[in-house]
Structures are given as C-alpha cells and as structure tokens.
C-alpha cells in the first residue's frame, strides 16, 4: 500500500466513523425544552462536535492500523474476496 492509498483509507475510515459517532449522546432542542423559533425541535442543542471529532480520530486510527496491517501482511487479498472468479488463475 502506498502513502496515498494509506491516506485515502484513513480518510474513508475517519468519515465513516464520524458519521457513526455524530448521533451518540446528542441533546435536541425539544429534549432541552428550549426550541428557538424558526428551528426544528430535533435540532441539536448541544452537539459536542470537537469532542466527537477527537473520539473519531482515536477510533479511526485504531481501525486504520488494523485494516492497514491486514492489507500489508497479505492475510486477506483481493483474490480472497473474488467470489465469481473474475480475476482468473493466480500467477
């Protein structure tokens, strides 16, 4: 895996993790009882995005190390997930 591939893999894992972490422990305006006129009751009152970004960075780093280790070591290759044998015989 090259440097660019590693960065792209990290960014994909980071954004997938971030989209998973965003809704955790969010407090809506409706739950807080303080709905600002012109906004939806489901709008966040306290979102803690900075804290969630740091949590996401930690989780994504651990996941990236695991996935990159598997890719670099060759434990699982593209041929292992080729269910329809479209790659042809191994050289």
Image (cartoon, rainbow, N blue to C red):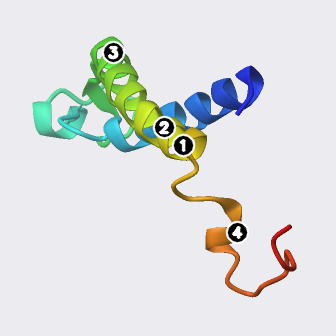
Query: Residue placed at 74% from the left, 27% from the top?
Result: 2
Mark 1 or 4 closer to N-term? 1
Query: Residue placed at 31% from the left, 30% from the top?
Result: 44
Residue 47 visible in this rendered orientation of the protein: yes
Q: Is residue 87 above or below residue 23?
A: below
Query: Residue placed at 12% from the left, 30% from the top?
Result: 32
Residue 69 tag number: 2
Q: Nearer the viewer, residue 29 or 68?
A: 68
Q: Position of residue 70 (x, y in %)?
A: 49, 46
Label 1: which secondary element = helix
Q: Which residue is mark 3?
A: 54
User: How crowded is the residue under tag 1: few (<14 C-alpha within 10 Å), some, or many (20+)?
Assistant: few
Q: Nearer the viewer, residue 9 or 19?
A: 9
Q: Is residue 37 above or below residue 83?
A: above
Q: Nearer the viewer, residue 82 or 14?
A: 82
Q: Position of residue 66 (x, y in %)?
A: 41, 39
User: How crowded is the residue under tag 4: few (<14 C-alpha within 10 Å), some, or many (20+)?
Assistant: few
Q: Position of residue 85 (x, y in %)?
A: 78, 84
Label 4: which secondary element = helix
Contact between marks 2 and 1 (CB within 8 A): the answer is yes
User: How crowded is the residue under tag 3: few (<14 C-alpha within 10 Å), some, or many (20+)?
Assistant: few
Mark 3 or 4 closer to N-term? 3
Left or right relative to 21: residue 90: right
Mark 3 or 1 closer to N-term? 3
Label 3 vs label 4, nearer the camera: 4
Q: Quadrant of the C terminus?
A: bottom right
């Amino acid at each position: 895996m090259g440097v660019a591939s590693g960065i792209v893999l990290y960014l994909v894992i980071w954004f997938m993790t971030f989209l998973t972490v965003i809704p955790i422990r969010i407090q809506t305006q409706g739950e807080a009882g303080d709905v600002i006129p012109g906004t939806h009751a489901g709008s966040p009152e306290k979102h803690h995005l900075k804290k969630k970004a740091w949590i996401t960075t930690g989780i994504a780093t651990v996941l990236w190390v695991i996935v990159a280790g598997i890719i670099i070591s060759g434990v699982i290759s593209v041929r292992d997930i080729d269910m329809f044998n479209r790659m042809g015989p191994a050289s």
